[in-house]
Image: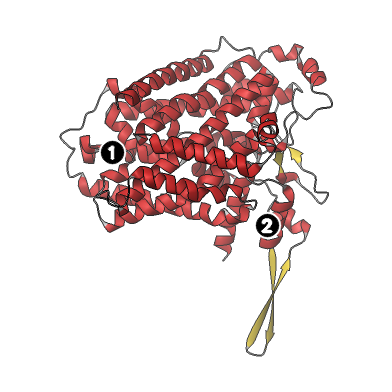
Amino acid sequence: SSFIRAAYLRELGIFQMIGVNSNKAEFKQVYDMLTVRAQTKEQGDEESVQIVPASEDEDAAELHSKTGTAGTYLTLMKAFVGIGILAMPGAFAHAGYILGSVCLVLISVVSYYCSILLIHTKDYLIEQGAIKSSGPSMSGGPAQGISHHVGVGAGVGPLDASVSRMSESNAGTNDITPSSTYAATDISKAGKSGSLSHSVTFQELGLKVFGQRGKWAIEAGICVSQVSFVCAYFLFIGDNVAAVVNKDGIFGSGTFYTLIATVAAVPLVYLKSIKKLVPAAILADVIIIFGLGVIFAYDFITIDRVHETVSAFTPSGLPLFFGIAVFAFEGINIILPVEQSMEDPKKFSGVLRQSYVHLTVVMILLGALSYSAFGESTQTPILFSLPDNDLVKSVQIMYSIALFFSVPLQMVPAFNIMESYPFYKNVFGGNMYVFRLLVIVAAGGIASVIPNFGLFLNLIGAVAGTATAFILPSMLYMTALDKWHAWRPLFCLIFGSVGGLIAFIVSCIEFAEG
């Protein structure tokens, strides 16, 4: 049907933006498969349908087109909504339903603002000629647009004196190869010639502002985040499958099923075709919506009154709340490619703001309602607090299946980065199978020894989340525009650094105490 086909194409577009597909030829092959014309000829009482590949003009018009506001909104919500939202009730149990709500709004505002800083850094570098891009910027023009939106004077930054030096130092070289970046190319401008235009990446900003070390830092943050997500997926799958099929521990523990999921996932990371991943991605979207509906239903059924063990303010639990909330908002890596894929990038800030508002409302409702309903018995993920019946078990299994098939989506961008470095060839001889096997086994091994799902999410958010979402965007902006005196980006930098450090220390202490 046209609806399924549209969903299929939307997933393909998202894969392209996050760098999942490895080459244009494969992407074009999928387009040729999908873009077909049905030629119906009546032959008596029967009809024959001939499937004919569409022309390149039709491909370019329908599938290489830029994204509108609705498509951008759906892409952002898909990027943000994941297993982190299932940990929010447990996070609220640490901080209290009122304090947790206030802090979640603050983290949401800072996350949104840092995303805007990242885009304006990109726009400023393009305006200064330090980097090149294929389309209009969100600010819609020169540095004045940046100043107006961010709220600080654009002024003259240190790049004005060094643009020519950076251009000379990069002459004759590829700044960042497509295999090592998120969306290093923009297929929306691919024409009949088949050439792809350049799309600015997070890593490229780090390279231009801080040099090679900046690129390394950003790529390290991305790799740590992606591998950590997979560890969390394996842990979630193991615990939930064990809870469903092995309540009495007869058929093995959660660790056993975590290791089984790890072994079973190995063939997935060898897939060379994104076509095989699209149905699983669509399934995951449906499962998430269905699962959230089930959780909200049980919240309303259970919460005839606020549970007597519920607390409104628990400041001592904020460090355990902070990292989980940051993890739940993780999505900074997709901001630049999504913004550059829009038909009108000037509308992106409004769409992003709308996405953050809606996501924050859903998280507050889920966190506060679930915590109010289950009180001190609130577990992470919240599925473990729901009644032990067939409906809940089905949700647990469906979530586990969706996450299992999402493993390659999380790992391929990290693999693209890691496999672009010399150690991949020097140590592993460029053998993809050996390298990816070791990485996946290491991720599963880490997941198998993690004692607490919520603490692990808090640790990820405290380290990788704050680095990529708060610290690096703020530092990139203030350094590029020489705005270290601007209080808002400076606040974001301090907020992420101090909050992440405290959350990291408290998480390590909790892990040590068991």
Q: Amino acid at mark 2?
A: Val
What residue is drawn where x is 56% and y is 39%?
438
At 38% from the left edge and 46% from the top edge, which residue is drawn?
256
The correct choice, above or below, for 481 with respect to 514 in the image is: above
Residue 4, image x and y in percent? 55, 61
Q: Residue at x 41, y 50 (%)?
A: 400
- Name the secondary structure under disc 1: loop
Q: Which disc, if any, is residue 379?
A: 1
Residue under circle 2? 30
- Quadrant of image for the N terminus: bottom right
Residue 18's quadrant in the figure? top right
Residue 260 visible here: yes
Q: Is residue 460 left or right of residue 377?
A: right
Instruction: Tell me residue 80's x, y (percent).
Output: 48, 39
Earlier residue among tags 2 and 1: 2
Number of residues whose C-alpha sits closer than 10 Å to that of mark 1, classed few (under 14), some (14–19) or many (20 or more): many
Is residue 237 visible in the rendered image? The answer is: no
Q: Amino acid at mark 1?
A: Gln
Q: Quadrant of the C terminus?
A: top left
- The reply, left or right, for residue 306 in relation to residue 490 is left
- Helix, strand or loop at mark 2: helix
Q: Nearer the viewer, residue 356 or 398?
A: 398
Q: Is residue 130 left or right of residue 456?
A: right
Q: Position of residue 170 (x, y in %)?
A: 79, 23
